[in-house]
Image (cartoon, rainbow, N blue to C red):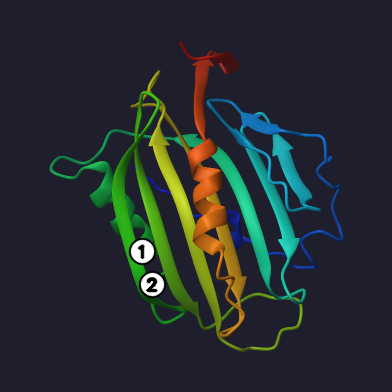
């Protein structure tokens, strides 16, 4: 199974997360894509850089435009697990491959099996030093990437489709949010599986 890290790692916020994109309306209470839904964040404003049936990316700046917080979710193809490897082991292996040296130095990586409705998932908490961050200032200084994410094969079609929900922050050393885990776990606790039927959402029984 190919596990994907949140868009914070892959794309970042190249010109400020909230400034260049439409803003998530304040009255939105829940966000969904095919297969999964979760509570909309209340501590806005959040810029919406992408939203379609299969993916959403929300972002906002931190203390400066280099630092950012990302909430994202996306569907992806989930081939069968390799023989002898469970979802937790596969998630850990793929995330380590995606954050390999010399750019990244892993400082913490905890992956656990969790259940979300009928879905068996891997929840990952990762903290890594990023020694080549792609940021607006091009400062060339090391930053910290912290990610809490869920990877879940969809229970309707576990060998075909999976979804990822992630809460991520990128910051300079000393600028970490002491409430990171509280905010990230609140998002994870709100996640619910919705049905995947021929690409259309239907509430799971």
- Where is 169 relative to 198, above or below? below
Frontmost residue, 125 versus 200: 125
Residue at position x 52%, y 70% from top?
Answer: 145
- Among the 4 quarters of the image, the one containing residue 68: bottom right
Q: Position of residue 14 (x, y in %)?
A: 74, 67
- The residues bearing labels 1 and 2 have C-alpha atoms spaced at a distance of 5 Å
Frontmost residue, 190 versus 16: 190
Q: Residues within 10 Å of mark 2 (few under 14, many from 20)?
A: some
Frontmost residue, 84 versus 176: 176
Q: Which mark is residue 100?
A: 2
- Where is 67 relative to 80, above or below? below
| Contact (Cβ within 8 Å) of mark 1 with mark 2 | yes
Q: Position of residue 41 (x, y in %)?
A: 68, 46
Residue at position x 84%, y 40% from top?
Answer: 25
Number of labels in the image equals: 2
- Among the 4 quarters of the image, the one containing residue 159: top left
Which SS class for mark 1?
helix
- Where is 131 relative to 184, above or below? below
The residue lying furthest to the left in this view is: 84
Which image quarter is the N terminus in? top left
Q: Which mark is residue 82?
A: none
Q: Residues within 10 Å of mark 1 (few under 14, many from 20)?
A: few
Q: Position of residue 131 (x, y in %)?
A: 52, 83
Q: Position of residue 53 (x, y in %)?
A: 66, 28
Q: Mark 1 sits on what residue?
A: 97
- Among the 4 quarters of the image, the one containing residue 100: bottom left
Side of 81 where 133 appears, left or right:
right
Residue at position x 76%, y 83% from top?
Answer: 137
Which SS class for mark 2?
loop
């Amino acid at each position: 199974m190919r596990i994907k890290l949140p868009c914070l790692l892959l794309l970042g916020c190249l010109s400020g997360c909230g400034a260049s994109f439409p803003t998530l309306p304040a009255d939105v209470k829940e966000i969904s894509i095919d297969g999964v839904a979760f509570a909309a964040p209340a501590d806005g404003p959040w810029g919406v850089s992408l939203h379609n049936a299969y993916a959403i990316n929300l972002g906002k700046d931190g203390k400066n435009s280099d630092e950012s917080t990302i909430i994202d979710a996306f569907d992806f193809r989930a081939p069968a697990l390799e023989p002898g490897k469970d979802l937790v082991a596969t998630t850990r292996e793929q995330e380590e491959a995606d954050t390999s040296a010399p750019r990244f130095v892993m400082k913490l990586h905890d992956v656990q099996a969790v259940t979300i409705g009928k879905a068996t998932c891997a929840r990952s908490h990762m903290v890594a030093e990023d020694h080549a961050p792609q940021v607006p200032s091009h400062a060339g200084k090391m930053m910290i990437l912290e990610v809490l994410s869920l990877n879940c094969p969809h229970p309707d079609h576990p060998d075909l489709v999976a979804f990822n929900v992630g809460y991520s922050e990128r910051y300079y050393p000393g600028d970490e949010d002491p409430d990171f885990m509280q905010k990230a776990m609140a998002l994870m606790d709100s996640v619910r599986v919705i049905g995947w039927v021929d690409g259309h959402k239907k509430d799971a029984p």
